[in-house]
Image (cartoon, helix red, strand yellow):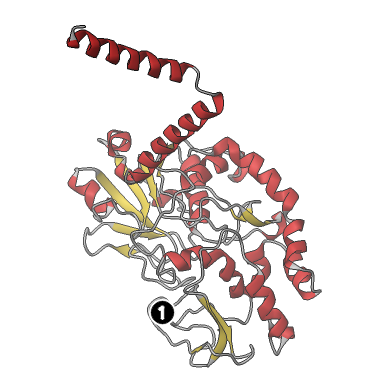
């Protein structure tokens, strides 16, 4: 027989055999193959660089052309090349009129709660309007001449982080003065966590304005959509809102912030532990302000002596820290694994071991917790599991509401 013919027949038989095997493949095998394919596609997407709203240039630059622009931002308003958004927009000949600065100021150097005065940015000579202290919401005269507003702040996903309170007031002022608002979205480094007690309306304040859990699991763009959609602004008004989304992002991704969002959140560990440890700000326990390990340690002179201690001293971001110049005993959390929920164990442990329970909590605790119940539960010795169970219904209701506004 001709050798070429044998070769052709062999190849043909092999092809028919492969086709036959493929046709008879079991459904579960095909499903596994499809899952693997989907996983590869997901991995490919995750390997792409996340682009923030600020880097999604084509979506917002045309909206700013030939407009008089106001911008709410601070040191976190940067692009992927680390250039600041304000500098970039000026290079693009965008007509920025004013900068509106939140807590910690435009350059992010002020202490938490420190009064920030209006002024000028030394680099650009642009006027700066402070949105902290007695002027949390810009007045009509401070918005005069602004045709469109841009909002670009890096949030960390906690209800008491005041950038979302500034967002509320900016949205309200824009709505009242018929100014369109563009929110440049940024990933939430705690975006996969929805946890904690729901704020009770009677305990609303600048460190908690809306009836949401302590960790809301939304980006600042998604949160803006919720404020607008639920008509949480004064008199239920709504602003003309445009969200510029992030690209190549989903909320399960880990996201490391390129700059400190505020002076006392120096790294990923502090940002992850922030919501859990910030409750200590309503007690006589230090969270490490006045050290280089802010929101990664806790301690006080009233806790039992241990192998770990620290002494807070004035430093950048903490001119007068809690227990200044006093030896504090507590715990070092700098090396623990990333938390995936609001942790109460350290707060409960500190309360149970403090030498002066009568002075442990202060009035600020209820504002931070958003409810009086949490303090009461800890004081009477309710377990952490029982406390968490008391949040369950509220969290389920919030998660259902939240679905309407998710982008990623």
Front-most of residues 37 and 332: 37
Q: Which residue is mark 1?
A: 292
Q: Where residue 323 sits: x, y (%)?
A: 54, 88
Task: Look at the image and tell me whether residue 303 can be seen.
Answer: yes
Please name the residue shown 33% across and 54% down the image: 77
Secondary structure beneath label 1 = loop
Please name the residue shown 72% across and 58% down the image: 202
What is the number of callouts on the image?
1
Quadrant housing the N terminus: top left
- Left or right: where 405 falls relative to 92: right
Front-most of residues 309 and 119: 309
Q: Is residue 37 above or below residue 97?
A: above
Dot 1, how many residues are within 10 Å of its Cα: few (below 14), some (14-19), or many (20+)? some
Q: Quadrant of residue 12?
A: top left
Q: Is residue 104 above or below residue 286?
A: above
Q: Residue furthest right?
A: 380
Task: Look at the image and tell me whether residue 246 can be seen.
Answer: no
Q: Quadrant of residue 302?
A: bottom right
Q: Residue furthest front?
A: 1
Please name the residue shown 74% across and 84% down the image: 358
Q: Where residue 359 sits: x, y (%)?
A: 70, 84
- Left or right: where 373 falls relative to 80: right
Q: Is residue 301 above or below residue 217?
A: below
Q: Where residue 37 sits: x, y (%)?
A: 42, 32
Q: Is residue 376 above or below residue 172?
A: below
- Left or right: where 42 falls relative to 127: right
Q: Where residue 93 sits: x, y (%)?
A: 19, 43
């Amino acid at each position: 027989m001709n050798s070429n013919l044998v070769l052709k027949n062999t190849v043909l038989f092999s092809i028919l055999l492969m086709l036959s095997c493929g046709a008879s493949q079991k459904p579960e095998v095909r499903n596994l193959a499809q899952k693997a394919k989907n996983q590869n596609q997901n991995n490919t997407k995750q390997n792409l660089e996340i682009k923030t709203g600020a880097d999604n240039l084509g979506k917002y630059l045309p909206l700013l052309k030939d407009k008089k622009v106001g911008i709410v931002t601070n040191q976190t308003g940067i692009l992927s090349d680390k250039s600041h958004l304000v500098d970039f927009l000026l290079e693009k000949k965008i007509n920025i009129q004013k900068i509106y600065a939140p807590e910690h100021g435009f350059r992010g150097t002020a202490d938490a709660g420190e009064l920030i005065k209006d002024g000028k940015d030394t680099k650009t000579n642009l006027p700066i309007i402070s949105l902290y202290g007695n002027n949390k919401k810009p007045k009509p005269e401070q918005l005069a001449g602004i045709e469109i507003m841009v909002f670009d702040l890096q949030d960390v996903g906690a209800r008491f982080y005041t950038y979302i309170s500034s967002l509320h007031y900016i949205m309200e002022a824009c709505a009242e003065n018929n100014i369109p608002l563009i929110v440049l979205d940024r990933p939430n480094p705690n975006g996969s966590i929805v946890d904690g007690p729901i704020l009770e309306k009677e305990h609303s304040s600048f460190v908690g304005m809306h009836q949401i859990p302590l960790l809301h699991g939304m980006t600042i763009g998604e949160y803006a959509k919720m404020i607008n959609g639920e008509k949480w602004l004064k008199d239920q008004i709504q602003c003309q809102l445009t969200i510029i989304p992030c690209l190549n992002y989903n909320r399960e991704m880990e996201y490391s912030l390129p700059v400190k969002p505020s002076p006392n959140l120096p790294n990923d560990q502090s940002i992850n532990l922030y919501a859990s440890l910030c409750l200590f700000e309503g007690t006589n326990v230090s969270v490490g302000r006045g050290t280089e390990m802010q929101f990664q340690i806790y301690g006080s002179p009233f806790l039992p002596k241990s192998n770990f201690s620290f002494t807070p001293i004035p430093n950048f971001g903490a001119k007068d820290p809690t227990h200044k110049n006093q030896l504090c005993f507590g715990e070092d959390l700098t090396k623990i694994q990333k938390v995936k929920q609001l942790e109460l164990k350290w707060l409960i442990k500190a309360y149970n071991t403090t030498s002066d329970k009568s002075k442990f909590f202060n009035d600020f605790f209820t504002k931070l917790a958003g409810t009086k119940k949490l303090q009461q539960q800890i004081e009477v010795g309710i377990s952490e599991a029982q406390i968490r169970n008391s949040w369950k219904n509220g969290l389920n209701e919030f998660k259902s509401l939240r679905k309407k506004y998710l982008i990623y």
